[in-house]
Image (spheres, coloured by chain):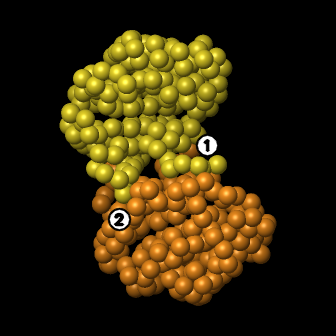
Chain colours: A orange, B yellow
Amino acid sequence: MVTRSTSAVQWAQSFIAPVLVPGCLAVDATAGNGRDTLFLARGVGPQGRVFAFDIQPEALERTREQLAGAGLLERVVLLATDHREMAAHVPGTVNAVMFNLGYLPGGDHRIITQPESTIEALKAALSLLAAGGRVSLVVYTGHPGATEEQKAVEEFTQALSPREYTVVRLSFWNRSAKAPVVILLEKAGART
Amino acid sequence: MVTRSTSAVQWAQSFIAPVLVPGCLAVDATAGNGRDTLFLARGVGPQGRVFAFDIQPEALERTREQLAGAGLLERVVLLATDHREMAAHVPGTVNAVMFNLGYLPGGDHRIITQPESTIEALKAALSLLAAGGRVSLVVYTGHPGATEEQKAVEEFTQALSPREYTVVRLSFWNRSAKAPVVILLEKAGART
């Protein structure tokens, strides 16, 4: 039942949902308040695992609370690690990786994701991605540094081979230029 | 199971699917080869109705064949009528309207949808749309006249009130500028 307009996060989750199959691995590259981690944990089932990265202890603690509250903490590995290092911490190919780029809502707005490290993390995500796997990036805009990050993500994803990746860019067309942009990416090939 | 990259038509159908509830009314504003009419007919159920418009007899005949082959023709009203006139032919509010803008694949490429009549048809579609209802527009590009039509649709939808409509514009980000653009629109309010 649709009772409110569809947000950027809902678009990202709707795109990711079909690739979450029981027992698969998934990554929340920016745990933040744990909303996407919770969504992924529900989707991977009891035998699946979600690897949730955040360099801010406050974010990991919020995520831990969310998951514990839902009784799903055992499906999640919380990593106080830079998401650029994700390939070293995830023990196999993943069906889904989710990014929310910007600052932690309610947290320290001076701590924002940075273009260089975001692109490195995105490369790491693609290296882990299974055939048919999907990546979502919700790019928040309007804060200092946002334009550079959006530009970096848009240029990197636009240059990906169309034979290897389908890339869709979604914008909220009748809202201000500060509305988030969503980039959705699917790796070619049938999922196994 | 995702086995191939997601096309513009699949994006449109995925967006429309959740609002197709048994017994509702829906419109295929550009019946073409009947692909969307068939999709809508499946979604509205035996008590629902799909109103399929096309000014080309060839398109309506193809649509009739598709629906008859699937045993769903009785759910569909085929109208050899300009889609600008849809409000006069649909007997109630609709949950979904789908547009494919361009020319009939395999048909006469000189017969294309025109910016002025497309915007009139889109206004008619919005006048019929129920609260929570959705409209999809797949805008094919690359043929003569396509740029004007894309511009007209983009400008019209961008000017819609964000309180009344959520409008999302979806582009195939790592493909040529000739790739189709998809505009997805949701009317505010809870569906009844």
A136 relative position to B178: left or right: right
* Residue A172 visible in the displayed image: no
On the image, numbered disc 2 is attached to which residue? Answer: A159
Place residue B152 in its image quadrant.
top left
Question: Could you tell me the amino acid type at mark 1?
Answer: Met
Distance, label 2 to label 1, CA atoms, is 37 Å
Quarter that holds the N terminus of chain A: top right
Question: Which residue is tagged 1?
Answer: A1
Q: Is residue B90 left or right of residue A72?
A: left
Give the camera-side residue of B27 and B171.
B171
- Percent position of residue B106, x then y: 37, 25
At label 1, counting other C-alpha atoms closer than 10 Å, the crowd grade (few under 14, some 14-19, many 20 or more) is: few
Which chain does the numbered disc 2 sit on? A
Classed neighbour count for the residue bearing mark 2: other residues with Cα under 10 Å, few (<14), some (14–19), many (≥20): few
Label 1, secondary structure: give it.
loop
Which of B95 and A128 lies nearest the eye of the viewer?
A: A128
Q: Can residue A27 be seen by looking at this rendering? A: yes
Residue at image position (43%, 82%) is A117
Quadrant containing the C terminus of chain A in the rendered view: bottom right
State the image quarter where residue A139 is shown. Answer: bottom left
Q: Is residue B117 left or right of residue A143?
A: left
Which residue shows up at 41% across the image and 23% down it? B32
Q: Which mark is residue B103?
A: none
Which SS class for mark 2? loop
